[in-house]
């Protein structure tokens, strides 16, 4: 329970990701206290899912809120309504800008957390759950990048596959990360997904203690 509480508290610390991904070094005590055994890594993975379930992402905006307003599921005619501007594709107003910025930041928060897990998972290399933890973290990292590529990447059919897309972060760094082209991002996605698949197919979740 203590480790789960540490993971949840650190979600707030890690949520300050800026648009260009300049982040301050995370408190090493977090990694040293939490990521020492299987339960700590499980708590950290739960933290990633908790962030994905926030209102900014799949608790609302990515599920039935902001994204649904873009596809016209709501007929919003009241100019005071939260989704009025996004329904009209008027992205320069404060409300849609805030939602877009928050979606970007939350996904990169999840990515940063998976990279912290992956940077420390070698500590449980001899644990039967090592492949599961590593594979799940890599898979989550790929999932988040895929969503970002869909939302913020170029239209490949019109702009080409070499157009600038998103930063693809494979490690915890404390400086701005250059934007990858769509082609580079897709190649890194395929690499992550292939590695995650190879790790996870080794797991027998029925027999694994």
Image (cartoon, rainbow, N blue to C red):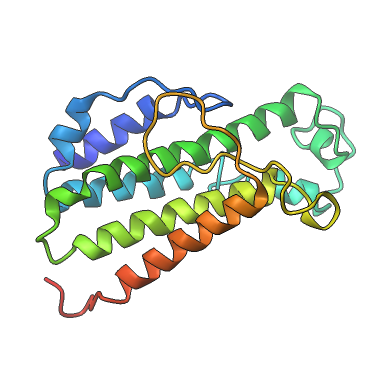
Q: Quadrant of residue 138?
A: bottom left
- Residue 63 visible in image: no
Whole-percent x and y of residue 56?
56, 39
Q: Quadrant of residue 15?
A: top left
Whole-percent x and y of residue 154?
75, 47
At x 69%, y 43%, the residue is 152
At x 15%, y 74%, the residue is 208
Looking at this view, is 172 or 88 the one in front? 172
At x 60%, y 46%, the residue is 148
Decide: is 72 above or below 165: below
Horizontal side, residue 127 vs residue 132: left or right: left
Decide: is 142 above or below 30: below
Looking at this view, is 82 or 208 the one in front? 208
Q: How many marks?
A: 0
Whole-percent x and y of residue 90?
85, 32
Horizontal side, residue 152 vs residue 200: left or right: right
Looking at this view, is 134 or 92 the one in front? 134
- Residue 93 visible in image: yes
Which image quarter is the N terminus in?
A: top left
Horizontal side, residue 170 vs residue 30: left or right: right
Decide: is 20 above or below 205: above
Which image quarter is the C terminus in?
A: bottom left
At x 58%, y 51%, the residue is 185
Decide: is 161 above or below 88: below
Whole-percent x and y of residue 14?
39, 29
Horizontal side, residue 203 vs residue 146: left or right: left
């Amino acid at each position: 329970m203590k480790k789960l509480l540490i993971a949840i508290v650190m979600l707030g610390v890690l949520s300050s990701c800026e648009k260009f991904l300049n982040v301050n070094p995370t408190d090493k005590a977090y990694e040293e206290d939490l990521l020492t055994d299987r339960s700590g890594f499980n708590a950290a993975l739960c933290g990633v899912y908790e962030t994905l379930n926030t209102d900014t992402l799949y608790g609302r905006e990515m599920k039935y809120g902001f994204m649904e307003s873009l596809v016209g599921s709501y007929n919003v005619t009241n100019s005071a309504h939260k989704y009025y501007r996004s329904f009209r594709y008027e992205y320069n107003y404060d409300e849609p800008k805030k939602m877009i910025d928050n979606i970007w930041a939350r996904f990169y928060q999840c990515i940063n957390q998976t990279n912290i897990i992956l940077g420390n998972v070698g500590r449980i290399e001899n644990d039967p759950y090592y492949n599961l933890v590593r594979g799940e973290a890599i898979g989550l990292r790929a999932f988040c990048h895929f969503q970002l590529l869909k939302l913020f990447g170029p239209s490949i059919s019109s702009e080409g596959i070499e157009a600038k897309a998103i930063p693809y972060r494979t490690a915890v760094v404390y400086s701005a990360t250059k934007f990858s082209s769509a082609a580079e991002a897709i190649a890194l996605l395929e690499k992550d997904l292939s590695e995650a698949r190879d790790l996870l197919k080794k797991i027998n979740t029925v027999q694994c203690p």
